[in-house]
Image (cartoon, coloured by chain):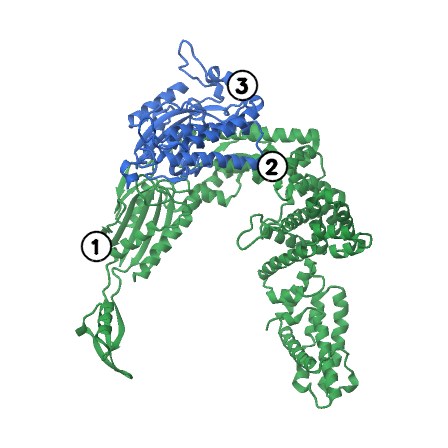
Amino acid sequence: MSETVDKPRSFQEIILRLQAYWAGKGCAVLQPYDMEVGAGTFHPATTLRSLGSNSWAAAYVQPSRRPTDGRYGENPNRLQHYYQYQVLIKPSPPDLQDLYLGSLKAIGIDTELHDIRFVEDDWESPTLGAWGLGWEVWCDGMEVSQFTYFQQVGGHDCHPVSGELTYGLERLAMYVLGVDHVMDMPYNDPQAPIALSYGDVFKQTEEEYSRHNFDVANTEKLLSDFVNAEKECHAILSVEHMDPKTGKRIIMAHPAYDQCIKASHIFNLLDARGVISVTERQAYIGRVRALAKACADAFVLTEAGGWKAETESA
Amino acid sequence: MADLLIELFSEEIPARMQKRAAEDLKSLVTNGLVDAGLTYASAGAFATPRRLALSIEGLLDASPTTVEERKGPRVDAPEKALEGFLRGAGVTKDELEIRDEKKGQVYFAKITKPGRPAAEIVAEVLEATVRNFPWPKSMRWGAGSLKWVRPLHSIVCLMTREDGAEVVPLDIDGITSGNTVWGHRFMSSGSFKVTSFDDYATKLKQNFVVLDGAERADHIWHDATNQAFAQGLEVVEDKGLLAEVAGLVEWPVVLMGEIGADFLDLPPEVLQTSMKEHQKFFSVRNPKTGRIEKFVTVANRETKDNGATILAGNQKVLSARLSDAKFFWENDVRTVERDGMEAMSAPLANVTFHNKLGSEAARIARIATLAEEIAPIVGADPAEAATAAKVAKADLSSEMVYEFPELQGIMGRYYSQKAGLPDVVADACRDHYSPLGPSDEVPSEPVSVAVAMADKLDKLTGFWAIDEKPTGSKDPFALRRAALGVIRLLITNDVRLHLDRFIDSQLLLHKIAEADENDGVIDTLKEILDEIAEHGVFGAAFDAISDKLSDAQKDAVNQAAGNVPDTSEDLLSFFHDRLKVFLKDEGIRHDVIDACLAMEGNDDITLLVKRARALQAMLDTEDGTNLIQGFKRANNILSQAEEKDGVEYSFGPDLKFAEVAEEKALFAALDAAEEAIKPAMKAEDFTAAMSAMAAMRPEVDAFFEAVQVNADNDIVRRNRLNLLGRIRDICLSVADLTRIES
């Protein structure tokens, strides 16, 4: 029984189709954030832009790192470096579920043949001080996306509410392409003169990073890097809002948030190195959350965060 | 009369919330209507993943007009008072009626509240219901501030009468009511209009939505069992899963699939848990072998390939999941086969049980010591009990239990078997957590009983030692459940032991763990610990060695463990409180338990319960109740006389001073009762003792009927008081009847 939908042939084609689809639906297609993050949510285009009253619509691929998931490229589904596709629209449009289902069709999932389900999944990020309600979306029993209506980020209530979609690209692509091991998945067109598999591109790096993350990363340096990032974040935020050079009010929420991202990634590395005990774990998460909250507090005082000049004078 | 149809159509409602939400919708709306004077004949509520629906039949067309009479000021009252009354009642002066009352002429007002059309009330009630709906968790969406479980899209609110249907107008933050309904998300061709509840339910079905959750569940179960039966298999029943799955689909389609041959040798619990938790699959079992061989999944749609694609996808996901489970299982088995269960439990030394109570490994060591001591009392081999305790929690560090915490104990049993340990040890791994709830099965195998008791007693004494007791509704460590577990283990297995002694010794173990090595007190505490086995409680054990101790040593012991007796007593009374709750369900009154608690040996739960059951049984008889009254009467007379005379009448009466026949008869009855009660009490045959006691009733009654205790003759009076003293002594030897409330 052949599917009626035109099927993609490679990992990159799925990404390209998602980009084209969401661009067609009016999203600004952004590029990945240039820092190490654990998930697409950490991109300031999601974390910070979900705050405040300004409307927003963005879609992007975000390379994400989870050092503890490293398996030296051996495990068919687990990677320490992988890609998420992220969509954030504020305010969440009333037809967001339909838009989402349209994106599945765009990448070759025929909803006439598959069983798509929205299964309760409340999302919470203790490190971002964020939570929302929504679902994990199942396709024939497999989780293919997270679908969340943000209620709170960085301790701030979201007004209006953002709708967030997160696709785990490798897993989704493996399903669409019918591949059992991620490393076997065609990265570019298998008919291309130089056909590359996902393994051709990433097997080497998975091995290298797995070894580095688990056994080599310098924990003493990481511990001090964490403290430095934390200090730097607070230091940036404590600077006078008025810039004496330009005479403008410039709150540096983004540079401070970079330090929060950094601290979060260092924490993940320390976790992978196994040097954080169960009790310390909570404390570290609390410290990252404190940074995220401070950055959120700062962002809502910026114009992008919905601040208007007259509100402060009032 | 009208019928009302309400539908609240939203994005997917979590399965676990649907049933309750339908009930809440029904009660909130119907209560609101009735409060406003709109009564109805019947109501039914339904839920699917995308909608809550309510059907109300036989609703009044309007609320009835009501007339209220209100009394006002007197006619001669100041004008101001009248003005205020008119304003409050909303009437004019010429509408008032003047009546003659005792104190003079008084104004009366009749306030007529006209009835209101049903539609108006329905709109108000529904809006209030939507705005205040008690979802366990709700959310906002878009730019609005309305809250619902997930975004709310449309509202149907339709009143149907014989002459047709009309939409009840309603606008909640821009969501307006109508009569448009959407069918299945994928299979329906779109929206449609409805005219009544019947029309709604019928058209929903034509549009691939089964409205009633129970009907969906029935369909799933029926179809699943049929498909399994056709292949000589059976579906493993799981009501919770069935309800959940029925809440995930509007159009259930049952599909049965294969579990890859590679995975069929996994323990059935592993297959079942993995399939249920991750995939929400039912397990399908071969009744001949007990093996799980297939699965049932429930899709939310029909497809032109009859579900082939869906089933293939599900099978693939399952294979990936089970590959993980198989990997864990094989790693775990390799560990225990090569290095034994100890190797598996070794990492528990680094796992904190509680930051004030040390590691899991320390806890396991304490449990093993205690289990070994309890073993002989419950008929278990001490060495086996100790071994079982040492390995019972090893699986907490297995990969499988890390992945599926609910398999703790179950995996321990498999791993113990693989490690070559005896079956009783393996079974204890599985059973030592039991009983978990009040209806959970109680282990009966002696080794399991010993470990299960030790596990719970160590937990209770530990949290008592660090003063983390349950308060109010807070019981984060499930200590009430643990105490009830101990009680049920003792009673069900008819185990006789003095809890005091084990509470004391275990509390002391916690104190030893806590004690500062530098104080040099640990050796002394250990000595006391050894003595407890001999002397029963901490105090006596301490006395036994105190001669050898210097004052400084005594101080150190007091410092480190001086509060053990108080803590122990407090924990024992916690057990007694749990026991009262437990026995209350059996119909045993709290004062009956108090009467038994006041007796010697109340730390022997089994004995306590036997006594309480016998006493309750006696009280349930007429003789018993009357005897208690006789006892109380005797006791009252005695107390008064004893207070007045300043003596205790317990010398034993003399038959030769008995004057009347009833008095003499009572002597005989008391002798007979005593003769029966003494050996019965010795044999702990409380039923016999209680019935012997109750058998005194006719003579006791006759005595009080015929005899005046406070006779003029002092010798006769004293003799009679002493006779009452015998009644009291005999009764109190059985239970403290003074505690029984009349």
Would you identify the image quadrant in which residue B496 lies? Answer: bottom right
Q: Is residue B142 left or right of residue B498?
A: left
Q: Residue at x 37, y 30 (%)?
A: A252
**Quadrant assignment for the N terminus of chain B:** bottom left
Q: The residue under label 3 is which amino acid type?
A: Glu
Q: Is residue A140 left or right of residue B452?
A: left
Residue nearest the observer in this picture, A269 or B393? A269
Q: Are marks 3 and 1 in contact (CB under 8 Å)?
A: no
According to the picture, the residue beneath numbered tag 1 turns out to be B163
Residue B63: x %, y % from top left: 26, 62
Which element type, helix, strand or loop, lies under badge 3? helix
Check chain identity for marks 2 and 3: say if they share one: no
B488 w.r.t. B700: above or below: above
According to the picture, the residue beneath numbered tag 3 turns out to be A207
Check chain identity for marks 3 and 1: say if they share one: no
According to the picture, the residue beneath numbered tag 2 turns out to be B289
Check chain identity for marks 2 and 1: say if they share one: yes
Q: Which mark is residue A236?
A: none
